[in-house]
Amino acid sequence: MKARRLLSATWLGYRRNQRGFLLSAGGVAAGVAAFVYFVGLGQGVSWVVGERIFPVDTSHVKVVPQRVALGAFLGGGVLDDEAVARLSALPGVTNAYRQVELRVPAVSQYSGDFFGRRIRMGVDILAVGVDEEYLVDHLPPGTRFLDPGEDDWIAHMDDEEESSPVPVVVSRRLLELYNTTFAPARGLPRLDERQLVGFRFPITLGTSYIGRTQRMPRRTVMGEVVGLSDRALLLGITVPLETVRRWNSSLLTEEDANGATYSSLVLAADGPERVQDIIFAVRRAGFDVDQTEQKLAEEIGVALTITTLALSLLALVILGLAAISIARAAHAHVTARTREIGVMRAVGATRWDVASIVLAESCAAGLAGGLAGLLLALLGAWGTDLLAARYVVDFPFKPDSFFIFPPWLSVIAMGAALLAALGGALLPAVKASRLDPVAALSGG
Amino acid sequence: MIRLTGVRKAYSDGEGRHQVLDGVDLEVASGEFVAILGSSGSGKSTLLNIIGGLDGDFEGEVEVDGRALHRLEDKGLSRFRGATVGFVFQSFNLISEISALENVGLPGWFDRGVSSSKASVLERATEVLKAVDLSSKTHRRPDHLSGGERQRVAIARALFSNPKMLLCDEPTGNLDASTGRDVIDLFRVLNKKGMTLLMVTHEARIAEAAGRLFRLSDGRLQEITDERDDHSRLLGQVTDEAGK
């Protein structure tokens, strides 16, 4: 039977049984809509978690000294230049980026114009120094991320023109937290990345608002935001490695400064598939691997996947029920058309012709339902985003849309719709094809 | 054209095995108009279904238009029906939701030939509707046609594929006498144009239109000769049986 004729037969079937067609298509639409909506939601939320909340670089391994330094006996435990050289030479490692934490307390006491608002505020500051190469690709072209040297010291705010500010990189996530929680609570303006670049603020070393600090000289420097990066310290500032080393050694004793060692070392693998081998090698060398963010991201990812799967399963159950509904409708339609099937057989229809007509009619219902379901899911997503934008208060990392609909999702959804339609119509089609023509002509 | 040799067919029901056809032999030449008379339940429809390839479950040999139906599988029988025979049924068997034109074009759905485009199907359907004098009612649905008109639509559908023979099962059974005569007149015209017709009926008056008459009784087929006395006697007997 030619495809065009099959279409005619399908159209005739629709004209004769519009109610059954709409019921079948409606069931499929409900299943497809639920499936696409939930998977799209899962994809969207997973993207936010993976790309914005925990932007983990899957090719990076963060090496830290062991908490219990048994490694010292094995030649490990201290992240000094010799250890960095050894770890950098591990198979699969393409780059190594050193990191040093600021070991002295620091605060920022800001008094003056803050993006159009006059403020007076002080906050404790955490800082980490990193190799320039670690951030250079994440900063605007031409950005200098180098230690300014001893010129960074200033006596007070007015000296800033005469000093060389310390380049500071801020985490995008910190800006998000500021915009969605800190700024609204304090009545401060929300900022975007472009506004923040070039912003200068004082950093006073050797003091803290939190708890008591040991007596040490105070020094004030000027920091200037040169860019934002997901690789920057989440709740603090990221500055050049040499700057932090210099600050530590100038304010602490040589022993406390521990100037020849590093807080951590980020190893870049030449592919995510090499990461496990590198982690094993790092541990064999007597060091630990900090996987806190990866593990948290993985745990949240697993929870999201399980939730999405459960909801998708629910949607598939709806599709299964739709298939049963299609089976019932097709069965009733075949029974009602028994004499007509007999006529078709009398004028030359083969068994396959009859079966293909029944299957084509159900497929048409499945396709129509699938398309309607896709449309419903998109409308549902649009409505959800609209409601969330209007009625859900801003929270960190709140996305503009909670949904992502990759092209493969539509393909899978339409495939599932067709499968449900075909699955439901299979038995009625077989029944119709096996009808004895003589019995069918006499009405069954 | 048609050759049946020792055709036997039995049905089993709750009361046991019922031999409907018990060694039927028949030969019909191309262009003949043959009527088979028999009372209700005598097996004449069964015989027609076997000749038309609708019923492939029988014993014996059936050869139609050079094809041995007893050797054909379901697919072969379907192709045979589509190309060689046209069926006319007592209850018309039209699809009520579509027009006369679409009903007539139904065989075109299953035509594997190159001329089965929509345009050629419509053209052919219009042509055969004109041949049965229904060209003014092509777009009417069967519900809006009289009984005679519906049967003529059914005949047009049977003629759609330009078959070599028409197999008519009680074609006037649902028509009044006058309309029935019109249908038989149409059959005569078709026969004069060379169409082979095989009609089963229990109405002797209708059967008289045929060139040759057979009587099916007790599973056996007996030809009714041309001698008027015997002819009338047998016709009367058949009519009496049908009336019982």
Image (spheres, rainbow, N blue to C red):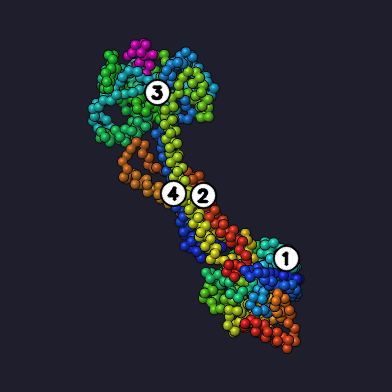
In the figure, A382 relative to B1: above or below? Answer: above
Residue position marked by numbered label 3 in the rendering: A145
Which badge, 3 or 4, comes first in the chain's sequence? Answer: 4
Q: Nearer the viewer, mark 3 or mark 4?
A: 4
Residue position marked by numbered label 4 in the rendering: A34
Residue position marked by numbered label 2 in the rendering: A416
Real-space CA distance between mark 1 and mark 3, rounded to the nearest whole angstrom: 93 Å
Real-space CA distance between mark 2 and mark 1, rounded to the nearest whole angstrom: 44 Å
Camera-side residue of A338 and A127: A338
Residue position marked by numbered label 1 in the rendering: B70
Do marks 1 and 3 share a chain? no
Magenta residue span: A244-258
Quarter of the image with the N terminus of chain B in it: bottom right
Q: Are marks 1 and 3 in contact (CB under 8 Å)?
A: no
Looking at the rendered structure, the kind of residue marked 3 is Phe
In the figure, B216 relative to A423: above or below? Answer: below
